[in-house]
Image: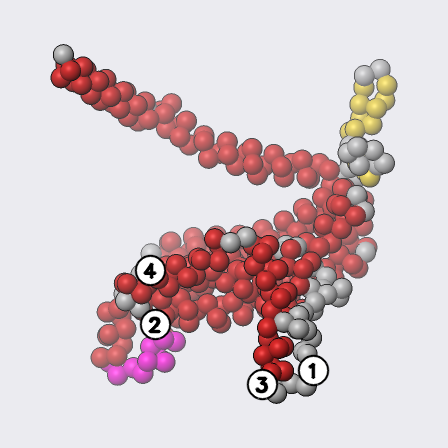
Amino acid sequence: MLDDALQAEQASRQGFARRLAEFLGSRAGRGLVIAVPYLWLAVFFLLPFVIVFAISLSEAAIARPPFKLLEDLGYGLYQVTVNFGNYLFLLTDSLYAVAYLNSVKIAAISTVIALLIGYPMAYGIARSGPAWRNVLLLLIILPFWTSFLLRVYAWIGILRDNGLINNLLLGLGVIDQPLPLLYNDFSVYIGIVYSYLPFMVLPLYANLERLDPSLLEASADLGCRPWKTFLTVTLPLSLPGIVAGCLLVFIPAVGEFVIPALLGGPDTLMIGRVLWNEFFSNRDWPVASAVAIAMLVLLVVPIMIFQRYQMKQGERA
């Protein structure tokens, strides 16, 4: 009896698996599989974007929510009011242009510093033995196991006047008074590079780890020096990893809010901080939404450049 029940259950499972495979192989099944990611993008990307874009075209109002998109004409009739003045306001007020440019400058410099630090790290991990490689990769992702906010707060304790670095330098007699390491652009650079360094190292490692070692051996056999082999073989072949890592660092760094708010000074003006002030301090949701849309457009350009670069690489391959 027990064997018969087990055989019947196994036959039922095999029949279900066969019917599921047939459904997924059919036209309706393939359409359902394709529709899932599109539905995800529509709900979690397109719909919030449409809402923010609609608010950016509304007028500020003393109400809940603090904007007016529909005007009540009475008798159950409403009129949609479209206001492009929020975008014009961004062009006329130099505060936003300065914030955008300063954000791009800080993000670009941080990306270059992260590349200069991350490339040797990724190269060393890719050339290490299998046993050490896993340990080193674990150390790279280990900071993600703790809160991002706590990690940024930890730098306050390290960089402040009576922090670890100043106390060490004072104790060694290198300096006579504490260095101003906190609440300026320097501390923002340190916070961004530290926080986003794994996003630079991991794509570079994935690229360098797949590099064919026979190319390096052939270069050495032909009498090429190591530094020339690096410049002519390793570096060009690792460009896809460099581009991917730079975009993964640059894009979130442009809109960063937490690090400038905690480590930056009053002169550290970034667009993420301006956005927060417009939303929560000024409660000007239409202008804040216009700032967010403008920032999104600013970030879409490097993404499109990266996709075009990838398409060209795919065509060459």
> Tag on residue 213?
none
Q: Which residues are magenta?
A: 222-231
Label 4 belongs to which residue?
134
Left or right: residue 207 versus residue 113 is: left
Q: Which is more foreground, mark 1 or mark 4?
A: 1
For disc 2, the marked residue is: 233
Q: Position of residue 238 (x, y in %)?
A: 39, 65
Q: Which residue is mark 1?
A: 177
* Quarter residue 193 falls in: bottom right
Return the disc, 1 or 4, that comes first in the chain's sequence: 4
Circle 1: residue type: Gln
Relative height, residue 142 to residue 231 (above, below): above
Q: Earlier in the sequence, mark 2 or mark 3?
A: 3
- Give neighbour class at mark 3: few <14, some 14-19, many 20+ (Cα, 10 Å): few
Q: CA distance from mark 2 to mark 4?
A: 26 Å
Cα–Cα gap, marks 1 and 3: 12 Å
Residue at 64% x, 55% y is 258
The residues tagged by marks 2 and 3 sit, at their Cα atoms, a distance apart of 44 Å
